Amino acid sequence: MVYVYSGALLVLGILMIGKPEALWKIENFLFTKGGGPSELYLAISRVLGVLFIIAAVVMFIVSFV
């Protein structure tokens, strides 16, 4: 089961780094009309994406120990 969680974190982290605008649209499509994400949101999303990738790798390594 750890492999599923680490895989999900890895995919989410890659999406957060590569396409934070698309994730913003998925999160907020019901609440905003014609707006876009702020620069702060994009920066925080990319930083969290890196942290998610690191967490996924650590979970994968720890599952073997």
Image: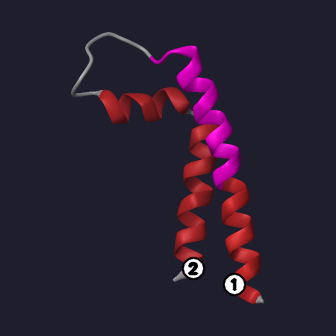
User: Visible in this render: residue 18?
Assistant: no
Residue wearing tag 2 = 2
Amino acid type indicated by mark 2: Val
Question: Residue 48: percent from the left, percent from the top?
Answer: 62, 42
Judge by depth and name the residue closer to the eye, 3 or 41: 41
Q: Residue flagged by tag 1: what amino acid is it?
A: Ser
Main secondary structure along the magenta-highlighted residues: helix
In the rendered view, tell whether residue 47 sits above or below residue 28.
below
What range of the chain is rendered magenta?
A: 37-52
Query: Which residue corresponds to the image point at 65% horizontal and 35% vertical from the top-left?
Result: 46
Q: Residues within 10 Å of mark 2 (few under 14, many from 20)?
A: few
Instruction: Quickly name the residue at label 1.
Output: 63
Q: Position of residue 30 (x, y in %)?
A: 21, 28
C-beta proximity under 8 Å, tags 1 and 2: yes
**SS at mark 2?**
helix
Q: Please tell me whether residue 48 belongs to the stretch shown in magenta.
A: yes
Q: Is residue 9 left or right of residue 25?
A: right
Q: In the structure shown, which secondary structural element does the residue marked by tag 1 occupy? A: helix
Image quadrant in which the C terminus is located: bottom right
**As rendered, which of 54 and 25 lies closer to the eye?**
54
Residue farthest to the bottom, as pictured = 65
Q: Is residue 15 above or below residue 21?
A: below
Instruction: Answer above or below: position of 53 versus 43.
Output: below
The residue at the point 67 percent across, 37 percent down is 47
